[in-house]
Image: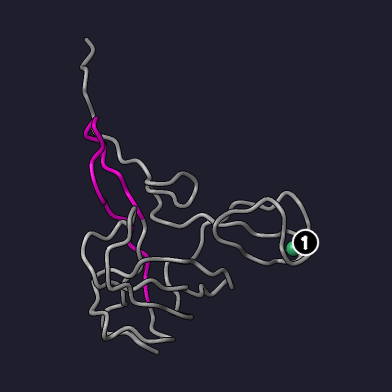
């Protein structure tokens, strides 16, 4: 017998940025010079090599620069302001633009250690869970 399940799926807000199952961001690595990029790209910005490889990126990094948004911007995954928007430098050297979640905006600082979170932001008409990525401060950690 067949059991028909209308199973809710978890789908990314934007394709190609992360792997929901693995809980990792997907970037590119240049096989020629070793440079990492996020989001994925086809041509290396460093040496112009083509055919970059898809790679899973580190889930932790440090805030390189940030800004605080005092209002909810149209299309933002954040429904309440203020919130932080940061460029996070990963150990591989890739830089990820992200919204900061689970943190007091006043506590955000450059060099702060943050970790990746992939979570549901809304449901679509079919009841699928729409997932987006964020970074949040590592608990008890700043190095
Ligand atoms: Zn390269």
Query: Height in image: 17 above or below 70?
Result: above
For label 1, the crowd category at 10 Å Cα-Cα, with few meaning under 14, some 14 to 19 and many 20 or more, is some
Query: Residue placed at 51% from the left, 62% from the top?
Result: 57
Image coords of residue 40 (percent x, y)? 58, 54
Image coords of residue 66 (percent x, y)? 42, 78
Query: Height in image: 69 above or below 143?
Result: above
Q: Quadrant of residue 45?
A: bottom right
Residue nearest the observer in this picture, 131 or 80: 80
Q: Residue furthest bottom?
A: 143
Query: Residue placed at 21% from the left, 64% from the top?
Result: 80
Stretch in magenta: 114-132
**Apparent side of residue 94 relative to residue 85 in the rendered image (left or right):** right
> Which corner quadrant holds the N terminus?
top left
Image coords of residue 49 (percent x, y)? 78, 56
Mark 1 secondary-structure assignment: loop
Q: Quadrant of residue 23?
A: bottom left
The yes-or-no answer for disc 1 within 8 Å of ligand 1 is: yes
Residue 101 in the magenta stretch? The answer is: no
Query: Residue placed at 46% from the left, 57% from the top?
Result: 25
Residue tagged 1: 32
Coloring applied to the structure:
one colour
**Apparent side of residue 27 relative to residue 68 in the rendered image (left or right):** right
């Amino acid at each position: 017998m067949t059991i028909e399940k209308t199973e809710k799926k978890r789908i990314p807000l934007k394709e190609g940025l992360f792997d929901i199952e693995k809980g990792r961001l997907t970037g590119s690595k240049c096989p020629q010079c070793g440079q990492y990029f996020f989001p994925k790209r086809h041509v290396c910005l460093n040496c112009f090599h083509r055919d970059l490889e898809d790679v899973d990126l580190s889930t932790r990094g440090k805030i390189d620069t940030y800004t605080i948004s005092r209002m909810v911007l149209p299309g933002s995954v954040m429904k309440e302001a203020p919130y932080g928007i940061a460029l996070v430098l990963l150990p591989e050297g890739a830089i990820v633009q992200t919204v900061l979640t689970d943190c007091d905006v006043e506590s955000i600082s450059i060099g702060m250690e943050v970790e990746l979170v992939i979570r549901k932001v809304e449901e679509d008409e079919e009841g699928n869970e729409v997932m987006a990525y964020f970074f949040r401060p590592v608990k008890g950690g700043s190095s």
